Image: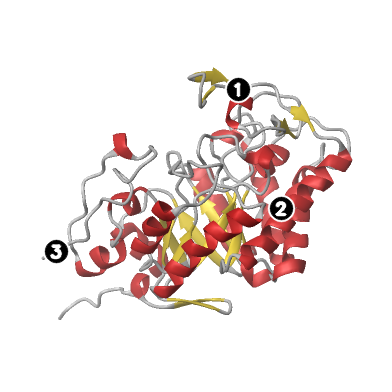
Amino acid sequence: MKTEINTQLFDPYDLGKIKLNNRMVMAPLTRCRAINQNLPNDLMVEYYAQRASAGLIISEGSSPSPNGLGYTNIPGLYNEAQVEGWAKVTNAVHEKGGKIFFQMMHTGRIAHPNNLPKGAEVIGASAIAQPGEITTYDLGKQPYPIPRELSTSEVQLTIKEFVDSAKLCINADFDGVEIHSAHGYLPNQFITAASNQRTDKYGGSIENRCRFLLEISEKMIAQIGANRVGVRISPFSYADETESSQTIKDTYIYLATEFEKQGIGYVHLSNMGEELADRTELWATIRKIYSGTLILCGSYDKEKAMHAIEEGKGDLIAFGRDYIGNPDLFERFKNDYPLAERKKNKWYGDGAIGYTDYPFYKK
């Protein structure tokens, strides 16, 4: 007697009113190809169109503000030229039947002045530098600088930048927006006590430290609809390494409860580190609290992804590195085709090599 094969990973899925062709998500991947004033370009159009068979594409992290362009050659979405560039990307994906969300990533203190446009500055929840070094345009690797702490009124203006950018996303014909609140970026900098020593309503208690993110999501939902708003979080990532396990659990249980109240479109749980019992327990707790779509991301292969969906741990599974070298990853997984070799030394650059030159599988 044959064992029935679980095909849910390849089946259509309703993300609220958005119809996805399958449950595979292309995770957001920083590729550093926006080489001309942080503008999306034709090379990026080709790259995303190649991968349109994913059920959902989440774009590379892109800033809602000049202040958030902390890395070299990452895109933004805060002016009309960027809207026009991104519209070419979304149209190309839609023409191939795909869906695409914009990942809104403000780097905050993970930045360097040499990487920012004229008039922009390195900002943060508090004047506390990110440990380590960052690659710059002209100065090689440099220590992270001390960011300028935002005043209360500037925090509220920064929230407005997120919301205004979300409206531009809709003008650019994105299907929705993912707020990047993971891996140490600006919303995460407010959430984590190690980077947030504020004494106003955006610092101190868990509720206050989560206020920045929750005000962004609340105001964004009011402008573009809950179904079009998702959020990425990363409990127990390196950004949390100075927090106690219990504080991390309490923080993200609170956030999950608030996401449920807001009716946010999806929660994207990202794991970039080793498996931890505490993380597994917390993810299961979030699954019980939050009744919307849950995306899981973190070193999933085909078999692990199929089991996670079959066991009800998540609704969609995001794949990152395998989508770099396999634009047809959905077809390769579904048909048991072999995966292309990863070429990590070519992931970052300013041209097609290691970006759009990966072939589709041929029998």
10 Å crowding of disc 1: few (<14), some (14-19), many (20+): many
The first of marks 3 and 2 along the sequence is 2
Using the image, determine if residue 123 lies above or below residue 324.
Answer: above
Residue type at mark 1: give it. Tyr
Residue, disc 3? 362
Residue 244 left/right relative to 153: left
- Measured as percent of width and height from the top left, residue 62 is found at 57, 48
Helix, strand or loop at mark 3 = loop
Cα–Cα gap, marks 1 and 2: 24 Å
Using the image, determine if residue 307 lies above or below residue 97.
Answer: above
Residue at screen point 68% across, 38% down: 67
Residue type at mark 2: give it. Phe
- Could one spot residue 311 in this view of the protein? no
Q: Residue lying farthest left?
A: 363
Checking the image for residue 180, the label placed there is: none
Residue type at mark 3: give it. Lys
Residue at screen point 53% across, 59% down: 86
The residue lying toward the viewer, choosing from 88 and 161, is 88
10 Å crowding of disc 2: few (<14), some (14-19), many (20+): many
Residue at screen point 62% across, 62% down: 169
Helix, strand or loop at mark 2 = helix
Checking the image for residue 144, the label placed there is: 1
Quadrant of residue 337 in the image? bottom left
Cα–Cα gap, marks 3 and 2: 43 Å
Q: Quadrant of the N terminus?
A: bottom left
The first of marks 3 and 1 along the sequence is 1
